[in-house]
Image (cartoon, rainbow, N blue to C red):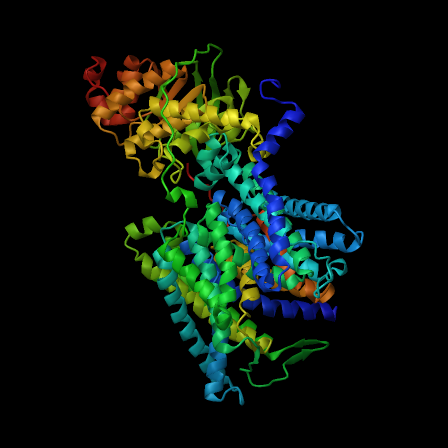
Amino acid sequence: MAGLFGGSALAQARRALLSWLPFVAAIPLLWLVEQFLASQPDWEYAFQNINHIGIAIILAVSLNLVNGLTGQFSIGHAGFMAVGGYVSAVLLLRGPSEDPYRLFFILCIAAGAGAAALAGWLVGKPSLRLRGDYLAIVTLGFGEIIRVVIENTRLFGGAIGLSPIPRYADFTWIWTAAIATILISKRLRDSTHGRAFLSVREDEVAAEAMGVDTTGYKVRAFVISAAMAGIAGALSGAFEGNLSPQSFTFVRSFEVVAMVVLGGMGSITGSTIAAAVLTLLPEYLRALANLRMVIYSVALVLLMLLRPRGLLGTREVWDLFPWRREKKRAVAAAKAPELSEALIDVRRATIRFGGLTAVCEFSLTVKPRELVALIGPNGAGKTTVFNLLTGVYPPTEGTILVRGRDTRGLAPHDIAHLGLARTFQNIRLFRELTAFDNVRLGCHHLTRESMAASVRKGELAEVEESWITQRSEELLAVMGLFHRRDDLAKNLPYGEQRRLEIARALATDPKALLLDEPAAGTNQKEKAELMQLIRGIRDRFGVAVVLIEHDMKLVMGVSERILVLDHGVTIAQGLPREIQTNPKVIEAYLGEKYARAHAGQIAAGRVQP
Amino acid sequence: MAEFFQHIIDGISVGAIYALIALGYTMVYGVLKLINFAHGDVFMVGAMIGWYVARWTGESRDPSIPGALLITLASMAVCGCLGFVIERAAYRPLRNSPRLNSLITAIGVSFFLEYGGQYVFGPNPRVFTVLPRHPGVHLGPVSLGYVDIVTVIVSVALMIVLQRIVFHTKMGTAMRAVSFNSTVASLMGVNIDRVISFTFVLGSVLAAVAGILYASKYPSVQPLMGLMPGLKAFVAAVLGGIGNVPGAMLGGLVLGLAEQVVSGYLSSSWRDAVAFAILILVLLVRPTGLLGRGEAEKV
């Protein structure tokens, strides 16, 4: 394997370097610009602004990773900036007085970034379990605590601040960092990890069901973003020559939030442009200095009312020019089926919500390639069974084995890894992502590339990425959705959304597919097609299918075995024919009185539920 | 020991004010699931209106009880209108959009009030006296300030009135219904728009009273005075269990006491960190707050 992917450390390093070559080559260019222009007095003021913009870009682009891509709302970014700034400043002040090659400075920046990342982890790890607005308050509170701590610590200069910090950070340093931030951010966004971030933003439950470790990804986004803010703080301190706690208040965090929101939540170029505009604006509004924050706030409210997704939305600047098209590919052959022990083995699982027993002593075994249907009146507990299987709820009693493994204590994404994929009764697509991205997300858990590899464009990352593209396009084609490849999921008609959900579930390479009312809201013709499709999926992908459905024609037509639930109790199971004439089933569906009145006909097999 | 009792008394007095503000947060969160960041600034506007009315009527030179009542009523009226307008103009159009958008809007409104206030009022604190001078009550070494006594009496009275409104009136029932499930409430014939407007007005009126009390305790008014008490009141609301009316009262008291004890025994410069430390602790240990009840998302 190592040979195939050029795994030796040297080759890895060469590849990484090559992919970053344009960037590395650009650094001397920045330095040249500085040598020629920055020393001239006319340009001094301009360069001060340009450097402020660079720092603002680092802050905005890094916050965009959390607020825009991952959909978490942090308003304590200034806190992480402060951590990075102060840690590096304290080191710089105690460091050697001469630092000709700036090696010690690099060390200080790294220490600042590390400290901020640690702070990000400490804050994020426990609090990212919270929902959006709670998280906002925790980050705000954390930012304030940092400020109070700094103000009360002698080491950090208390309320007066630290000075004089050696002014090592100039144009070259700041813009190198800014461009690196943008590139890292972009490469992360375009990788499978970036799609995992997006899936967290769109729908956490669905993301978990697709095998994305949502908490893990939130924490990662938070830590990376905090580290970048720490770098911004370190550079800011070494650029201004001083640090004071007053520059890291809630207002500072708010300015960064305003940049991200203005640019469009999730858009990297949007954040970059907004950072530049909002940094320059006050310089040109000096006459209105008193009204600056008033204008900011009114603009923000108006933006939310008129253009709630920001100026660019989730798009990038280049998305405004349509020139991206990829050639279509043919569908590859089917995979070989697998034969093994029971895929799913549920033993007397019971779940209670308070006093209500939603599912009682439910047992089910599903063998590979089997088609099983789960039917029953509304409220019988069918979807709850799916939620038990996929680990959304743990069973109160009983055990659930998936491929022989007890799923107790496993998170939904772990169970997805074991080979269970599902669709949802109330379609849960990642609505703001394209059909293609939805399916690509399903492949997420099959990849092995690390985040770092995505950033430096490792070979494995690229191989995997092209494989994901191919696999996803195949699946779209199988589901007859290829023409919808680049449409947003929310714009697809209902029937196609249902099919897209199946495609996404299949992308996780499941052993068993759980379909929750796939025919709901479709017409007779579509139902007939669906019947074919379900059989086709079983044959082509060799998966077992467990189906919840109300449409009896579909159930009887497609399933090999049927379980009937009523009020959480399994009242019957067997072949479709047996179920049709089972008096208990008819009673559950049609009522006791009717069943008794028509007992004769039922016995003769003339009444069907 | 006397010192300890002094801290407790100060804590109750501050806590009562936090509780009054927290009620506004909690009620709005109950019906809209929105953190109304601007609420702390409505509190500031309440104090500011009080200052203007006091100057206009000449009360600031010669405070009297009827005058204080007039000032409070005027500021309640203005803040009630302000709350109504904020909800109408900024929050209602966003009611069906993602919660993040409403939150950003709320922050925007908050900054608008703060810096708009700074533009109109000027950034410097101004002295504010509403209540006539009175030495207060001395119980041995412990002193009960006049303002503290009035604060506690007024707050308790208002909370009793609020309790009656929420649990014993038609509008209160409607509020609780909307908070439980707004779709179902509207199907049962509850006019959601009216209920939400009423909630905002009610919360803002309470904030106005809190603003007057706070300003006369410290005696000064300035445009950013709403920021910290606002955030702390929010912490109080979360501490008690957000969306829960008795919880907000309890949370306010607990927070006020904790803050006074810390600043009394440790250092007053750590006071602001206490609230946020409590908040983070609560969210980690019991995210639903002391009296709140959690609910799981339906899949």
Quadrant showing the N terminus of chain A: top right
Residue B233 screen position, x and y as percent: 54, 62
Let me know if residue B162 appears in the view.
no
Please tell me which residue lies in front, B203 or A115. A115
Seen in the picture, residue A603 relative to B269 is either above or below; the reply is above
Extreme front residue here? A36
Q: Residue at x 40, y 57 (%)?
A: A303
The total of numbered circles placed on residues is: 0
The quarter of the picture where residue A37 lies is: bottom right
Please tell me which residue lies in front, A324 or A419. A324
Let me know if residue A8 appears in the view.
yes
Residue A265 screen position, x and y as percent: 45, 48
Q: Is residue A173 left or right of residue A207?
A: right
Quadrant showing the C terminus of chain A: top left
Residue B57 screen position, x and y as percent: 46, 88
Q: Residue at x 63, y 62 (%)?
A: B272
The quarter of the picture where residue A492 lies is: top left
Seen in the picture, residue A309 relative to B171 is either above or below; the reply is above
Q: Residue at x 66, y 63 (%)?
A: B271
The quarter of the picture where residue B1 lies is: bottom right
Extreme top residue here? A339
Residue B140 screen position, x and y as percent: 72, 77
